[in-house]
Each structure stands twice: as structure tokens, then as C-alpha cells.
Amino acid sequence: MEIYGHRGAAGEAPENTLGGFEHAWERGVRRFELDVQLAADEQLVVLHDARVNRTTGRSGAVDAFTSRELGAMDARRGAPPWPRREGVPTLEAVMRAFPRTESWQLEVKKPARAERLRITLEALRELVTRLRLGPRVIVTSSNTAVLDMARQVAPRLARGYVCTKMDPLPIAEEFGCRMVVANLFTCTPRLRLGAWRRSIELSAWTVNDPISIRNLYRMRAHSIITDYPSMALPLVGQLGGGRAA
């Protein structure tokens, strides 16, 4: 069972920041889940919310700021104690900083302005192609409009359906998804069996306690997404199925 660091290591360091990804990398994480949005200058940035308020203490929509302005913010608000300022990074900066990452789950957020969705996915396709990361990238979303546009704009990139539904497999199949990224509480043996029969990977989020990790390991989930890789990696290693590299 593989381990993805959720937004880097969101329970241990400022989420979706270069420092947070570095923290996770140093502890053995080689797979990352993160969030992708489009800044005002049409650069891809790594931030979960549609607004900057929660993590930076500033106010406003992400797409109201340029990538340079976002990078100058301090994204430590609400995070565990952290010794230095961390800005909102560009996706390119994160990917270049960790070139040996084995897999990237890139959750694309649907822009408030619908016309910017195609721009977002075209920029993502261009970046992944330029960095030659295609086989290691999965474009994920809970929004079927994003998945549909991804299929049109970047058909060679794998897709994943992020969901809380008890039976997400018909939608995953409809949009040609390689992965179902399922809420922990919907991950059942029945879902695991159905995914296996359809050759769809099952990734569970957000898995932060040892009991759930053990249950998913026994269920033979393909991967979990966790805020606490410092806990999850050693535990899965003890169970016999975790890889740090």
C-alpha cells in the first residue's frame, strides 16, 4: 500500500508549501497529493481553498492575485508551529524541487469563472509535458466538469475521481478514470472489489489514524492519503507493504 502526503504533510507542516513538501520528503514520502489553481497571471499555484484567507490571513480570491503576490504571502496560518515564512508556491516550483517524486495526485479546483478551466488544464498539460512527468501524474477532481475537460484537453494524463459517494465507480468509468480517490468512510471491501474488477485504483483520504491504516491495508487499498506521514510510513512498513522510496 502506497502513502501519499496530503498537501505535503498537512498535519505536521504548513500545507501546500515548499517547506511542507520538503518536511514530508525528508521523512520518506515519495508520493504527493496537492491542490492546483490558476493565479491572475495564469500561472498554476498550489493552494486548496478558492480564497487565500484561511492559510495566509490575507483576504481575497486566489485568482485576484498574481503568482508573485501569492508567493510573497505567509501561508503558515493555522499550521503547526513552523520556524520560517512559507509563501504560496507555483506548481512548477514544487515539481522542480522534488523531481524524483514517484506520483503526483493533482487535484484541480474548478475556477469560479468557467472559461478559466480550459486555461488551467492547458497550462497543466504544458507544464507536465515540459517536465516530462506525464506517466507520474494523475489529474483528480470531485467535479465532473473538470474531469470531462481534462479528458478533452489532456487525454494522455490519467484521471482520478475524488468522491464521497458510496458507489463512485460508474462515474469513474464514465470519465475514463484510472483511480477513485474515496473518502475514508466510504472505503468498503465491496468498493475495493468493484474497483479491482474494473482495473481502477482505490486511494483513500484522509487517513490519519493507525486503526484505519491497518483496515485499509488488510482491504488491500492501493494507496492512502495522510496528513501524518511520519506516523503512517513506519506503520505501513511494519505491516509489510509500505515503501519510502
Image (cartoon, rainbow, N blue to C red):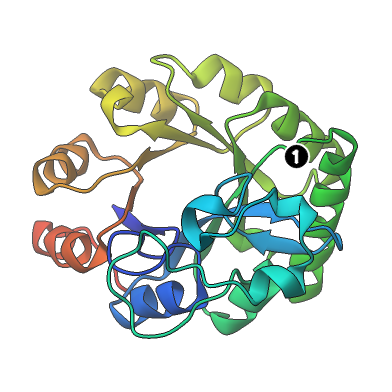
User: Element type at marker 1?
Assistant: loop
Q: Quadrant of the C terminus?
A: bottom left
Spot occupied by residue 209 in the image (x, y as percentages of width and height): 15, 47
In the displayed structure image, the side of residue 68 where residue 170 appears, left or right: left
Which quadrant of the figure has residue 152? top right
Report if residue 16 is visible in the image: yes
Q: Name the residue at 64% across, 41% down.
A: 159
Report if residue 132 is visible in the image: no
Which quadrant of the figure has residue 147? top right
Q: Name the residue at 41% across, 85% down.
A: 84
Q: Is residue 18 above or below residue 9?
A: below
Residues 50 and 192: in front is 50
Spot occupied by residue 1 in the image (x, y as percentages of width and height): 28, 52
Amino acid type, mark 1? Pro
Q: Is residue 150 above or below residue 58?
A: above
Spot occupied by residue 90 in the image (x, y as percentages of width and height): 68, 70
Spot occupied by residue 139 in the image (x, y as percentages of width and height): 64, 47
Count of labels in the image: 1
Residues 4 and 6: in front is 6
**What residue does disc 1 label?**
111
Q: Is residue 151 above or below residue 244?
A: above
Q: Answer few, some or many: residues within 10 Å of disc 1's Cα (few below 14, many 20 plus, some between 14 and 19).
A: some
Q: Name the residue at 65% across, 54% down.
A: 36
